[in-house]
Amino acid sequence: MSDVDTTDRLMAMLESARELNVRAQWQRAENAYVGLLRRLDRLPPAPSRRVHETWTTLRVRALLGLSTCVFARTGSLEDALEICDRASVAVGEGKVPSLSGAVLGQRSVLLHRGGRPKDALELATRALLTLDGTHHRDVGTVLLNRGNVHVELSRFDDALADYEAAHEHFSGLGHPVLVAIARHNIGWVRHVQGDLPGALQAMSEAASAAPEWDDGISMLGRAEVLFEAGLWEESEQVLAEAIPRLAASRYRLDRAEAEFYRARCLLGLRDFAEARRVAGIARRRFERAGHVPRAILARVLEHQAELTQVRAGLAPSRALARRRANEAIELAQRGALGGAVMGYDPGAAARIIAAHWAIVAGDHDEGSRVLAALPRTLRGAPLTLRLQHLAVLAELSFASGRREDGLRAVRRGFRLLAEHRSRLGTAESVAAAAVHGVQLHWVDRGAALASGSPAALFDAMERARATFAGPGRVTPPADAEAAELLTQARALLVQARELPENGAAREQREDLTRRARRLQERVRERSWRQSGDSAAVRAATAREVNAALRSSATGAVVANFVSSGGLVRAVRLDGARPELLTLGTTQEIAERVRRARADMDVLSNALIPVVMRSAASGSLARALDWLDETLIAPLRADGPLHLTVRDILLAIPWSALPSRRGLRTWVNSWVDHQPDSSRSPSDDVLVIAGPDLRASTEEAELVAAAWGEARLLVGADATCEKTLAALSSARIIHLAAHGTHESENPLFSSLRLADGPLFAYELDGVDLRGAIVVLSACEAGLSTVRIGGESLGLTSVLLRLGARAVIASVAALRDDVAARVMPALHAELRAGAKPGEALARAIVDEPDAVPLVCFGPLVIDAGQGHR
């Protein structure tokens, strides 16, 4: 065999080992490197200087690759650096000084992974000065790793510059996996800088560049971005999948990081015991790897899991709380020595937890002293840590009687959150991000309740709610791929619906539905990459709402409901002195609501026997009477009534409660106080009738006739495409169609049209400002509450897009009732009635309770008297 053949074979062995290394297949890569080194040891002396340099290069690169594998597999920095020493000797003996930069770069990687980022940064910079800039792989690799060091040191602008330069080198090299790694890291820095949609977009591009790159590292980064976006369930699922892959790679540090991040997700999902257990596993792995700062962070997370469980109701002794505070202070002192890791400062994180424990122990002065060592803003720290800091500052201030200081900290926190949400592009993204404000809101609300001031409680509720209200963007994106995916999902669901639900076709029906759900998930993931461009919403205050009520002289009442500590309360405003009313227990009210909805579902079936109808009717009457007496009577409202409610209270048929018959009643999930525009009836009327409703076409024609002139989409014309095209130009919109609320995935709640379901997702971004939307469909008024308290569903999306009012059903709506009520409703609207008033008049003579609710912003009549 010639020397050329031998060299080519050896070079192929090196490239094979390097590919295994890039894909983190450490054991296989190590075996390949060892095999190459053995072959090199058996070679005779090189016949020429050129061959000698080539074989030396092969030896040095095999040793450098081997050092990575040994460290990843064993965690021994000493053994890995010893292999680098052998590579340095080989460089000297082979007289190939151009390789010295590669050796420096590899030492930098090992020192970084061994917990010495500052030393690693110095070596990486020296390596770049030594390397030949035309050698794309070496330069790109050192840039990539120096970017990682910059991230460790929270120098994110420098990290981004290095990653982008590495991306250019790897693109010139034409190596898809290295291109993907650099692109993924660019996404990670964008996430740290607050551009979450841009981060997810870059990570998606990375996955497309190298679909085979599935070592778990990319999943770890994506999970971190999803966490920051508030998508904690999704992040936890990605991490649960990534951990076994990282375990297979046997690189313990990445696996431990994934376990740390998963514990953090579990904590947010309120699985306290599991969060504490997984954080403990991560800590022990970090300790065995000799990475003290990371181990401290994991121990802080264990503290946080215990502390959060305590705050949820398990009161410890003051002695235990003090002991935990002292432990956290000791962690803070140790953590301050090592600098930031994984984007966090262990010392700062531990001090915040120590201050929390001091609050639990009642040692407010000690808590303040602990926090005094931290900078005021924690600039550059992750959003979650900054919000924790502000929450504990606020709580200490409130507890020490310094209410104004507490409010300043709270307002700073909500300004941070408003800035965060302004970058998000979809209703789901905005709603999900609310989870980051839970602790801050809890502190704000608790202090307001303790103050005994109804106005303070009203303001505290609206500070949190307004932060995540409104749409994520004004202009919808043009996403042809998402549109095609939705078209495919729609077709699959139509096919599934046409098959029987039992018998031999059941399995095929279920398969079609599963395929449609997978397509919907792809659309959902794409939506997270969309940026926002909508203005922040200003929170209403009790003072300004009361002033508006006084000037209107309509006798209107505003009731802002609060569920806390197992009780439902309401702040009542009528223009005079605000009142705080305690109405009942959350559990009993929720049970009555569920009972009422079940009875309404029974009564919606016109074919049920008389005896069953009579029993359900009696049960419903009793439930509605009880809800009326418990929730409405204490409000003392005999005129217009606006209710701000959340959670299961959104499912109450408020207009059907006995004392509200014939009276204007409207509902929203936050106090969206808007001026009374006194709009004249609109001529821009759109009426749509979906299929498979016995009277939908007749209802649509009667509604159109009530306006004299309207655009009608019925039969085959009532398609999703035509409906979407017509929505933005219409100011009165009536949709008579079957409705489905998807509780697990609320943005895929839908209305059934001629060519299949029109999803709530497809409406996101449509301009509906000022429109009145009537949904003559079952359950279209229902919503699902996300972890942070935000509601999502068809109705909530329409309101976020600016609808002046949405009239929708919170239970099954009988066809014959809709056919009677809807034309009367539209006749009232055309005559100039407010939407809530029009609904009240349209259903006042119905013998059975009608589950239609008027949802909309708080618009108070400007001095017109009430009709």
Image: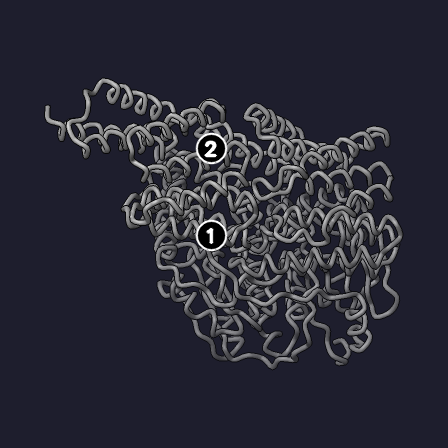
Q: Is residue 508 above or below residue 704?
A: above
Q: Percent position (x, y) of residue 129? A: 40, 47
Q: Is residue 179 above or below residue 74?
A: below
Q: Camera-side residue: 614 or 52?
A: 52
Q: Percent position (x, y) of residue 421? A: 59, 58
- Is residue 178 visible in the rendered image? The answer is yes
Amino acid on which disc 2 is placed:
Leu
- Which element carries disc 1, helix, strand or loop? helix
Q: Is residue 527 above or below residue 699?
A: above
Left or right: 3 as drawn, with respect to 718: left
Q: Camera-side residue: 118 or 682?
A: 118
Amino acid on which disc 1 is placed:
Leu
Q: Camera-side residue: 260 or 658?
A: 260
Looking at the rendering, which quadrant does residue 580 occupy? bottom right
Q: Earlier in the sequence, mark 2 or mark 1?
A: 2
Q: Locate the N terminus and report the quarter of the image it occupies.
A: top left
Q: Is residue 558 above or below residue 66?
A: below
- Which element carries disc 2, helix, strand or loop? helix
**Mark 2 nearby-residue class (10 Å; few <14, some 14–19, many ≥20):** many
Q: Percent position (x, y) of residue 831? A: 62, 79
Q: Disc 2, disc 1: CB below 8 Å?
A: no
- Is residue 622 visible in the rendered image? The answer is no
**Mark 1 nearby-residue class (10 Å; few <14, some 14–19, many ≥20):** many
Left or right: 353 as drawn, with respect to 122: right
Left or right: 119 as drawn, with respect to 791: left
Give the spatial CA distance, label 2 vs label 1.
Answer: 21 Å
Image point 33% across, 49% down: which residue?
A: 133
Q: Percent position (x, y) of residue 722? A: 39, 66
Q: Which mark is residue 160?
A: 1
Looking at the rendering, which quadrant does residue 501 occupy? top left
Q: Which residue is mark 2?
A: 110
Left or right: 794 as drawn, with respect to 47: right
